[in-house]
């Protein structure tokens, strides 16, 4: 009997190679290839003197190291570190506001949002705060549900208050940096986790309807009574200019609407198959970052943009299946938060290049050039890899049957 028991225990153990989520790794490699191809193609113009493709290779290599390092850390251990990470993240954001401008905290492109180490390595805390907030909200919801023995309307309201109090600090600190784009990403994360938190739709439905009504009212007020926005909310003129240039880019083509007009011209001129690698003709400043999708549309056409979106769809599908079969609620909440963040990034970035939404400084995940944004994403991917790596065989069997 002892021998049989030993054998059954041995069978439960998985070889380390089976613990790695190879599908996720393959998707990341595909994103890496797309990023290098598009950034290299974007650099064919005369506006760059730096080889950003070479830097992106370095960022990706370091990103893979970060992801694989986190993979070996148990989700249970990550759960224990969450509040420490939350405190460190908020302290980093606070430091940017209270520290004087220096070589450590310089003003870059009109904003003091980065720490610069050794004169070259820049880190943007707000990017990492996205992943930290996903982890923190996942723990808050998990702990609340675990210790709530009798679910009621009152317990749901308490949970919503916990989510709000946890989210308000980083949102205020990021808003004080005039970073509206990242604040919107945090709102998408909060919404995604709240929807799956178990809060009754008797509370959620009126809240979402009210949110939609407020958003619609703000847009209509900006269009017809912009002076009220300035007086009541104190929103700066350049932020209203973004809305106006979004609604009527041709009128602002010499200023705020220039990027949007050129982006639509680039994507429209790409046609079905595009102009080919390094075949871009439309000038878009800094097109290797926020407007990388315009490069894809112009040089690889409708087919190229669809393939990129299909790649994102494959990633979303994979992460959703992982969330569905996971037996750890904390892991499921985290995966939903990560999906919400990436979906919002993709929708906002693609949408702003084709006039669906206003322009914000939100990059295209895994493809746009940049260190902090990519490394933060890789931290999130590392947690996803950890969830798969430390899953039991029954969960893996469920995942494979779900495919």
Image: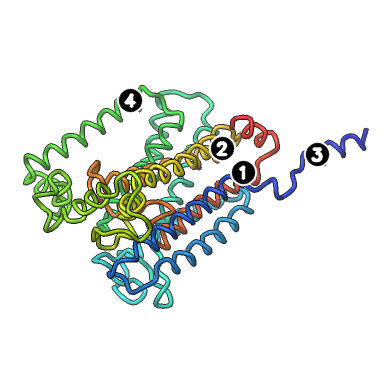
Give the mark nearest the N terminus, 3 or 1. 3
User: Is residue 316 or residue 86 the one in the foreground?
Assistant: 316
Would you place residue 212 above or below residue 263 in this image? Answer: above
Which mark is first along the chain, 1 or 2?
2
User: Dot 4 lies on which element?
Assistant: helix
- Compute the Cα span from label 2 to label 3: 23 Å
Residue 275 x %, y %: 32, 54
| Residue at screen point 34% across, 71% down | 105
- Residue drawn at x 8%, y 50% is 251
Can residue 143 be seen at all in this image of the molecule? no
Q: Which residue is mark 4?
A: 205
User: x, y (%) of residue 18?
Assistant: 70, 45
Q: Which labelled disc corresponds to residue 215?
A: none
Residue on which the image places disc 2: 322
Question: Callout 3 environment at 10 Å: few (<14), some (14 to 19), or many (20+)?
Answer: few
State how far apart marks 2 and 1 are (Cα): 8 Å
Residue at image location 46% in from the left, 53% down from the top: 377
Q: Is residue 154 left or right of residue 18?
A: left
Circle 1 residue? 388
SS at badge 3: helix
Whether pointer 2 and pointer 1 mark residues with C-beta atoms closer than 8 Å, the reply is yes
Gap between marks 3 and 4, in whole Å? 47 Å
Q: Residue at x 45, y 32 (%)?
A: 196
Which comes before the other along the chain, label 3 or label 4?
3
**Helix, strand or loop under label 2:** helix
Nearer to the camera, 354 or 94: 354
Along the polypeptide, which appears first: circle 2 or circle 3? 3
Residue matched to label 3 = 11
């Amino acid at each position: 009997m002892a021998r049989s028991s030993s054998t059954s225990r041995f069978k439960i153990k998985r070889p380390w190679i089976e613990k790695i989520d190879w599908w996720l790794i393959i998707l990341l490699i595909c994103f890496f290839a797309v990023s290098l191809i598009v950034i290299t193609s974007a650099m064919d113009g005369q506006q760059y003197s730096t080889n950003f493709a070479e830097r992106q290779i370095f960022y990706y290599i370091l990103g893979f190291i970060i992801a694989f390092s986190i993979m070996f850390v148990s989700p249970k251990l990550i759960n224990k570190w969450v509040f420490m990470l939350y405190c460190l993240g908020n302290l980093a954001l606070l430091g940017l506001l209270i520290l004087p401008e220096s070589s450590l905290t310089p003003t870059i492109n009109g904003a003091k949002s980065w720490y610069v180490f050794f004169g070259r390595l820049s880190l943007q805390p707000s990017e990492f705060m996205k992943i930290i907030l996903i982890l923190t909200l996942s723990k808050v919801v998990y702990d609340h549900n675990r210790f709530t023995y009798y679910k009621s309307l009152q317990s749901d309201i308490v949970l919503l208050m916990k989510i709000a109090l946890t989210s308000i600090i980083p949102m205020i600190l990021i808003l004080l940096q005039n970073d509206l784009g990242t604040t919107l990403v945090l709102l998408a994360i909060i919404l995604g986790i709240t929807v799956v938190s178990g809060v009754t739709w008797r509370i959620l439905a009126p809240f979402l309807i009210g949110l939609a009504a407020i958003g619609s009212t703000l847009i209509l007020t900006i269009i017809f009574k912009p002076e009220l926005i300035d007086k009541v909310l104190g929103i700066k003129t350049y932020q209203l200019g973004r809305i106006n240039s979004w609604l009527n880019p041709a009128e602002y083509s010499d200023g705020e609407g220039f990027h949007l007009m050129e982006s639509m011209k680039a994507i429209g001129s790409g046609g079905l198959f595009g102009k080919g690698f390094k075949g871009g003709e439309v000038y878009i400043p800094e097109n290797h970052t926020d407007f990388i999708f315009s490069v894809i549309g112009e040089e690889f056409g409708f087919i190229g943009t669809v393939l990129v979106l299909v790649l994102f769809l494959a990633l979303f599908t994979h992460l959703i299946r992982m969330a569905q079969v996971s037996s750890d609620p904390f892991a499921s909440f985290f995966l939903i938060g990560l999906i919400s963040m990436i979906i919002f990034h993709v929708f906002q970035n693609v949408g702003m290049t084709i006039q669906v939404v206003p322009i914000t400084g939100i990059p295209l995940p895994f493809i746009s050039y940049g260190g902090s944004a990519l490394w933060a994403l890789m931290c999130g991917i590392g947690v996803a890899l950890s969830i798969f790596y430390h899953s039991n065989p029954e969960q893996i069997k469920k995942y494979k049957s779900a495919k």
